[in-house]
Image: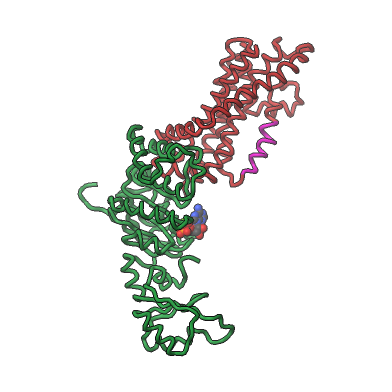
């Protein structure tokens, strides 16, 4: 598999050009969603939690929840951008076919796609961060470090989901992906409560998910409780998913597009 | 490339298999600079598969293929940099405007932005879509989308333009607009390689063509040359009332063939075709035999007749 070249940027620009036509509605979503979640979970549920035993570390529930939610939203954005749009570009709009008639190669398309997902994840997470600060959910200025964690987590999902999309003929599998993997991860990977609360089997499921590592790392950084060892482990695990997913996606796209 | 004049496309024994199915079964092709070359054949003949190999996006299974003097297995990107591709199914970016489709595409060829802007304006003028430049592509008519695709294929000023069924699915008026634009391109000296299953399109646009059927090339030549070689000057078309069980009208015409008044008789489900140098004379002989067709028509031979002669089947079913 060849390394990506300048055509990757061209594909990124193509996707950005399309995004310019609907950035308003997508930006609205990026702001509205954190507002709703932080209001519903952070404020109302949070008051209840804080009146009880509270969350570990002695911080308020809102400060505990916010960095995790930010990373979970990155997972959603990355998965969304790598599922239907990728299958659509292969099968319905034939976007990739058009690009490959130029000097571009499948590796360029993949790199340009991941670049675009990175852009979407980072800008959405930045909007989330602004909302989070306005809600008073920032326990420390270090909460900005949740941004690179969101980016890395986004890629750890974008790459394998792209690999999956590149092998599909029908879109039904995306609904299953959402229902059986993404939603359970969202609920049980430490975003809303420490995974130590879970039965042991589920706790280990949580540790295996890339989301838990993203959430834990973002939270540790935002609450200034990060330790070098565990931080490196989290980063390494997310990089592993990104690398393996990218390799699988490259192979799948090459097979599908060059035949 | 030196001073040698080399074919723009040269294929020898070119084969493409999908699993055990052979879509292209050993074809030889030479396409020269400045000519307009066609692949004429019915659905499933292997035209698109051939175009994708010539477009350096689909690796051949066997045989030799050189495009612009280069090997697509090694120099794919360099070859594609000098091609313009109009695929069978439009693949425009539906989320973009007409103009953006060209601006964005030009970047893949490493062209300076100012150059792409300038060419985009010229090309939209050429395909008569300047007034739609800022419109989204999605709601445009089929003919307009096709013209955007053609303009996009020209943004890198290609040496060769590959057009896979350029007017299939368009209404007659849109087809004529396209033919006229393609004819202008040809006048400018652009090499056109096109596929079609319309014999009128092949006759209009091609200097030279190959008749393709089931992955093979059945004949090659200019439209007039192919007609001269494989058909008669004229054709007499006859329609008869439907006869149930009785002797066929073709059999009744046997004496004409024996006498040499017609060269050949083809029986189609809805009509008989009599191949002859003189259609009117043949009609008189048919009437003299006491046969009473419902209708008769004398016309010149076409590529459709060539195809029928070569394969025993019609081009469009
Ligand atoms: N990617 C593919 N996989 C399997 N079979 C294919 C593929 N592409 C084309 N074919 C088959 O090859 C044959 C020739 O197709 P094609 O080149 O599209 O013909 P044409 O363009 O002349 O209609 C058809 O039977 C088609 O089903
Ligand atoms: Mg075809």
Looking at the picture, how far across and down is residue B240, in whole percent?
Answer: 51, 80
Q: Which of A200 and B59 is in front in this view?
A: B59
The colour scheme is by chain
On the image, the x and y values in percent for residue B96 come to: 48, 37
A233 with respect to B259 (left or right): right
Q: Which of B125 and A32 is in front in this view?
A: B125
Residue B293 rendering spot, x and y as whole percentages: 48, 82
Q: Colour of chain A?
A: red
User: Viewed as shown, does residue A47 lie left or right of B40?
Assistant: right
Q: In this view, does B212 lie to the left or right of A39?
A: left
Q: Residue at x 51, y 46 (%)?
A: A256
- Name the tint of chain B in the rendering: green
**Residue appearing at x 61%, y 46% in the figure:** A170
Q: Is residue B158 left or right of residue A53?
A: left
* Quarter of the view holding residue B305: bottom left
Give the residue drawn at x 37%, y 72%: B301
């Amino acid at each position: 598999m060849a390394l990506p070249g300048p055509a990757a940027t061209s594909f990124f620009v193509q996707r950005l050009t399309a995004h310019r036509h609907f950035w308003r509605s997508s930006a609205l979503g990026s702001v509205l969603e954190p507002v709703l979640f932080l209001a519903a979970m952070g404020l109302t549920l949070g008051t209840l939690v804080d009146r009880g035993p509270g969350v570990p570390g002695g911080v308020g529930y809102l400060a505990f929840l916010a960095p995790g939610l930010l990373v979970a939203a990155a997972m959603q954005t990355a998965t969304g951008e790598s599922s239907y749009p990728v299958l659509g570009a292969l099968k319905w709009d034939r976007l990739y076919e058009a690009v490959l008639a130029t000097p571009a190669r499948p590796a360029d398309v993949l790199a340009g796609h991941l670049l675009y997902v990175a852009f979407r994840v980072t800008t959405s997470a930045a909007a989330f961060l602004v909302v989070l600060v306005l809600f008073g959910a920032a326990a420390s200025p270090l909460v900005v470090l949740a941004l690179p964690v969101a980016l890395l987590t986004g890629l750890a999902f974008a790459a394998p989901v792209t690999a999956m999309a590149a092998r599909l003929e029908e879109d039904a599998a995306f609904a299953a992906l959402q229902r059986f993997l993404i939603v359970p991860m969202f609920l049980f990977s430490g975003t809303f409560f420490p995974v130590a609360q879970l039965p042991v089997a589920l706790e280990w499921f949580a540790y295996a998910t890339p989301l838990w590592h993203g959430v834990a790392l973002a939270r540790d950084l935002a609450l200034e409780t990060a330790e070098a060892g565990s931080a490196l482990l989290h980063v390494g695990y997310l990089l592993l998913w990104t690398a393996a997913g990218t390799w699988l996606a490259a192979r799948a796209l090459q097979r599908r597009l060059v035949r | 490339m030196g001073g040698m004049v080399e074919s723009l496309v040269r294929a020898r024994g070119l084969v493409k298999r999908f699993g055990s199915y052979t879509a292209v079964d050993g074809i030889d092709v030479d396409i020269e600079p400045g000519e307009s070359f066609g692949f004429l054949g019915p659905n499933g003949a292997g035209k698109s598969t051939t175009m994708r190999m010539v477009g350096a996006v689909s690796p051949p299974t066997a045989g030799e293929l050189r495009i612009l003097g280069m090997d697509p297995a090694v120099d794919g990107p360099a070859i594609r940099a000098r091609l313009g591709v109009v695929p069978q199914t439009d693949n425009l970016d539906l989320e973009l405007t007409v103009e953006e489709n060209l601006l964005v595409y030009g970047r893949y060829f490493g062209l300076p932005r100012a150059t792409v802007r300038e060419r985009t304006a010229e090309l939209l003028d050429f395909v008569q879509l300047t007034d739609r430049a800022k419109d989204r592509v999605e709601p445009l008519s089929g003919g307009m989308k096709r013209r955007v695709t053609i303009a996009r294929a020209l943004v890198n000023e290609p040496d060769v333009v590959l057009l896979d069924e350029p007017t299939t699915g368009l209404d007659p008026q849109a087809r004529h607009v396209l033919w006229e634009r393609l004819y202008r391109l040809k006048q400018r000296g652009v090499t056109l390689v096109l596929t079609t299953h319309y014999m009128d399109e092949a006759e209009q646009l091609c200097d030279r063509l190959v008749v393709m059927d089931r992955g093979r090339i059945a004949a090659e030549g200019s439209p007039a040359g192919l007609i001269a070689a494989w058909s008669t000057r004229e054709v007499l078309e006859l329609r008869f009332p439907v006869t149930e069980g009785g002797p066929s009208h073709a059999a009744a015409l046997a004496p004409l063939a024996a006498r040499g008044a017609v060269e050949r008789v083809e029986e189609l489900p809805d009509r008989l075709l009599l191949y002859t140098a003189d259609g009117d004379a043949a009609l008189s002989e048919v009437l003299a035999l006491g046969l009473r067709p419902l209708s008769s028509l004398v016309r010149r031979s076409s590529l459709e007749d060539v195809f029928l002669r070569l394969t025993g089947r019609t081009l469009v079913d």
